[in-house]
Image (cartoon, rainbow, N blue to C red):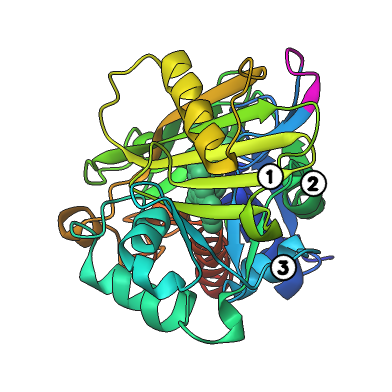
Amino acid sequence: MKKKNTSYHIIGAGVAGLSCAYFLKLKDPSCKTIVYEAAGHPGGRCYSFDDKELQTRLDNATHVILGANKYAARLLFPHKWHNNCYFWNVQKDTIETDFRQFKPEIFKAMCNTAADEASKKIKNKIFWKLFPWGTKQRRIYFSQNDLSQRLINPLAVYADELHTDCKLLKLETQFGQIAQLNFNNRQVEINAGDKIILALDAVNTSRFLETPQFEFNGIINIFYHTSQPLSLPKGTSFLGIAEGLCDWIFVHGNITAVTISDVANHNEKLEDLARNIWKQLDTLRNVNSAFVPPFRVIHHKHATIKQDETNNAKRPQNAQTQYPNLFIAGDWTMKDYPCSIEAAILSGKRAAQAALKKR
Ligand SMILES: Cc1cc2nc3c(=O)[nH]c(=O)nc-3n(C[C@H](O)[C@H](O)[C@H](O)COP(=O)(O)OP(=O)(O)OC[C@H]3O[C@@H](n4cnc5c(N)ncnc54)[C@H](O)[C@@H]3O)c2cc1C
């Protein structure tokens, strides 16, 4: 009799869940990967969409990939690396070419947590491994409204079945194992030998498993649709910003995107913030705009967990759970790593390895 191929039920079609499908297929091409996603599209915190108001395609957030993010770089196939990282010091009104003066700004961007609060272990990892100062590895790529096309859709190919609008409501257990998955629109029986990977964000994971409660930090992205590409000093297409209203500016064609990280409580009206930032960009460019171009503000309130010592210490050590047929993945599960695409991919790889081993 032909041996039944193992089915892997992956819940969550973010980068972690889709990467898990990719690594499972890489190791065991005959396995079956079934991905369930609550939203109407895959990608989680990483996707592109057509903005009807601005009449253009946007990423939900500009994502930066570093040369040293080897898995992210391999899967995303960046086509345009930048080797220089300049900073505009708003108070001094100078363009600084030595990025090493701006370690706090870089740590804040990578940890989404103020540098003096961020976990030492995460900062060490960034310093030595993820942003090796002074080597070519620190080159930068930023997403150009192509996250779905470059990363998410190519990964989704590794899901034999991808069910969107499919929200997990309950995990049913029997004899200490997960026996059934109850979704809003289906029930799935788990056969002996099959495995489940819960690849959710930290908040949703805690609805199903007794995981610690984390604090979160937000990120605000503002996209301005200009009639012509904005020109930045030194001909660069992105700039770090010190002591300004936002942290980074990225220009891609007629879209100028700005990012504000480490947003815990934001009281200013977002439209006012967008207008004030545009005025600050006027100062940078030495112009006086007659009007603010049309813009879209996206405020991700739970962008990542706060990456300080307390929250980093709560992150799990591995992908195992109390149920032998259930594993976890997600950027937040990679202790000592900054929550990022790279961490999400690594977590998917780790969960795939653990699930394959249990066979
Ligand atoms: C504004 C912003 C800017 C960022 N910038 C960068 C950057 O520059 N560089 C970088 O590397 N990283 C960046 N990140 C982080 C990066 O996006 C994340 O680390 C990564 O996308 C996390 O992937 P994930 O799969 O772990 O989680 P998620 O993307 O959160 O995926 C979890 C998935 O589970 C689904 N889900 C939840 N509950 C259920 C349920 N009950 N049933 C079924 N499905 C469910 C969700 O809909 C989601 O699709 C940024 C994030 C944000 C928000």
Q: What amino acid is found at the position of numbered circle 2 in the picture?
A: Asn
> Considering only order in the chain, which callout, 3 or 2, is on the residue closer to the N terminus?
3
Which residue does the image show at 43% across and 15% down from the upper left?
272
Label 2, label 3: how far apart the Cα atoms are: 21 Å
Q: Judge the density around disc 3: few (<14), some (14-19), many (≥20) Cα neighbours within 10 Å.
A: some
> Mark 1 — residue?
251
Q: Earlier in the sequence, mark 1 or mark 2?
A: 2
Q: Tell me which segment is drawn in magenta.
A: 52-56
Q: Label 2, on which residue?
A: 153
Nearest the camera: 295 or 107? Answer: 295
The correct choice, above or below, for 358 with respect to 305 in the image is below
Q: Nearer the viewer, residue 258 or 242?
A: 242
Secondary element type, mark 2? helix
Determine the CA span between mark 1 and mark 3.
Answer: 14 Å
How far from the left and from the top, in percent, is residue 279?
A: 50, 27
Mark 2–mark 3 contact, CB under 8 Å?
no
Residue 55 drawn in magenta: yes
